[in-house]
Amino acid sequence: MPVGRYIKKFARIGQALGPSEERGFALWVGYDIAGVTNDLSELGFIRVDGWSDEQLAPYDVVTFKPVTAAELGIEGKP
């Protein structure tokens, strides 16, 4: 079964503990999605198959979680 490698940005994760702390930040998550190799950009995913560590570095993604499309709730979408 083919596996597609993707990253997705989750924004505004976290809460401030005081007025001088950052109130939100972006978190990029890496996924290896079983059975999916198509364009999922409409769902906020960036396909990164074949990207080097240097290309991934700005996103701070170093590991990829193996999942299915059903686990992400995207089964049958694009």
Image (cartoon, rainbow, N blue to C red):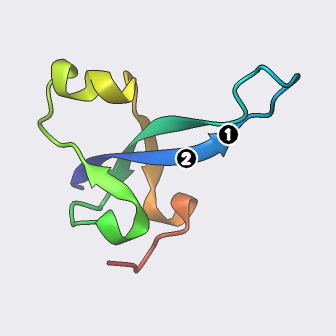
Q: Which residue sits at x=47%, y=70%?
A: 74
Local crowd size for mark 2, using a 10 Å CA cut-off: few (<14), some (14–19), many (≥20): few
Query: Can you give x and y, in whole percent of width and height, for residue 56 in the image?
Result: 26, 28
Q: Which residue is drawn at 40% across and 60% down?
A: 44
* Residue for badge 1: 13
As drawn, 51 above or below 77 = above
> x and y percent of residue 70 in the render?
52, 66
Relative height, residue 6 to residue 57 (above, below): below
Q: How far apart are marks 2 and 1 (CA)?
A: 7 Å
Label 2 sits on residue: 10
Q: Position of residue 60 (x, y in %)?
A: 39, 23
Identify residue type, mark 1: Ile
| In-front residue for pair 28/4 | 28
Residue lying furthest front = 20
Q: Do the residues labelled 2 and 1 touch (CB within 8 Å)?
A: yes
Residue 63 vertical position relative to residue 36 in the rendered view, above or below:
above
Q: Nearer the viewer, residue 37 or 27?
A: 27
Q: Which kind of residue does numbered mark 2 sit on? A: Phe
Disc number at residue 75? none
Question: Is residue 6 found left or right of 74 in the rendered image?
Answer: left
- In terms of image quadrants, where is residue 14? top right
Q: What element carries label 1?
A: strand
Look at 75% across and 21% down and name the residue there: 21
Q: Where is residue 65 in the image (x, y as percent from the top left)?
A: 46, 36
Quarter in which the C terminus is drawn: bottom left
Q: In which quarter of the image is residue 1?
A: bottom left
53 displayed left or right of 33: left
Picture residue at 18% right of the left edge, 27% below the top: 55
Looking at this view, is 18 or 62 the one in front?
18
Q: Position of 78 compared to 13: left or right?
A: left
20 to the left or right of 3: right
